[in-house]
Amino acid sequence: MSLKKTKSELAKIKKAGIIVAKTLKLLKAKIRPGITTKKLDNEAENFIRKSGAIPAFKGYRGYPATICASVNEEVVHGIPGGRILRDGDIISVDVGAELDGFFGDAAITYPVGRISKQAGKLIEVTREALYKAINAARKGNHLSDVSHAVQSHAEKAGFSIVRDFVGHGIGASLHEEPQIPNFGEPGYGLKLEAGMVLAIEPMVNAGTAKVVVLDDNWTAVTRDRKLSAHFEHTICVTNAEAEIFTRVK
Ligand code: CO
């Protein structure tokens, strides 16, 4: 079975992606010392519903919120709550929306107030790793070229790649084939074709690559409790450069 989407499916995923991007933009403006992650979650849910879409994560395998808000040593799937953001924190905000039966998914790690040089570098390198991966997501390339692009960039900078979570295909479901690891040798796996839609999501750690999941059964944290950053875009492979469906304007 081909993973290529039809034109009308692509148009719908793109619309969902635009709502995700707008939600991330709105949250960026709210993030500052003193705000709780629950408040960010409420703002995101209100905006997504007002846009006629449905929060994609809420209820997914029992996940209880609209966004994932992963602070500092939290890698992914941090559950929003009463935690108050403090000057110097970093926060990965992950947003998914469903519109007309199709999904968009994206994440950005934001600084809270003034952050350390090391935290800034981690964010920058993780964002760059995502864009290198998007650049590798070209017709005729192999899936592991995308994975390799992430790994080589992050490791060259002295950071480590999380191996316990992967990117994914996306469309009529939040998670579709293929799985997209953030590490690997180039030249392997699925050959990319125009019309495939991928959610690429590097998670990069300052220290060990190892993660553990907390007792809430969701929040993944670094085993050494050092910082982690996470970026994600929903993209479409085309005849040229990939199109980013969740680009924040
Ligand atoms: Co995702």
Image (cartoon, rainbow, N blue to C red):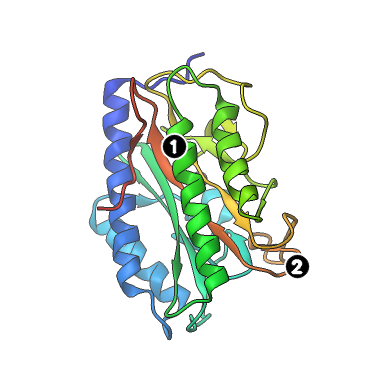
Q: Nearer the viewer, residue 9 or 76?
A: 76
Query: What label does residue 143 carry, if any?
Result: none
Q: Looking at the rendering, which quadrant does residue 70 occupy? A: bottom right
Residue appearing at x 33%, y 24% in the figure: 240
Front residue of 64/69: it is: 69
Q: Residue at x 39, y 40 (%)?
A: 103
Give coordinates of residue 191: x percent, y percent: 53, 17
- In-image side of 166 versus 174 (left or right): right
Quadrant housing residue 236? top left
Q: Amino acid at mark 1?
A: Ile
Q: Secondary structure at mark 1?
A: helix
Residue 3 spot, x, y in % from top left: 47, 20
User: Disc count in the image?
Assistant: 2
Under mark 2, the amino acid is Asp
* x and y, in percent, of residue 90 in the image: 51, 71
What is the crowding at mark 1: few (fewer than 14 residues within 10 Å), some, or many (at least 20)?
many
Tell which residue pokes out farthest to the top in this image: 1
Residue picked out by circle 2: 224
Residue denoted by label 1: 134
Relative to 42, residue 159 above or below: above
Q: Is residue 237 above or below residue 183?
A: above
Residue 173 in view of the camera: no
In terms of depth relative to the viewer, which is nearer, 144 or 105?
144
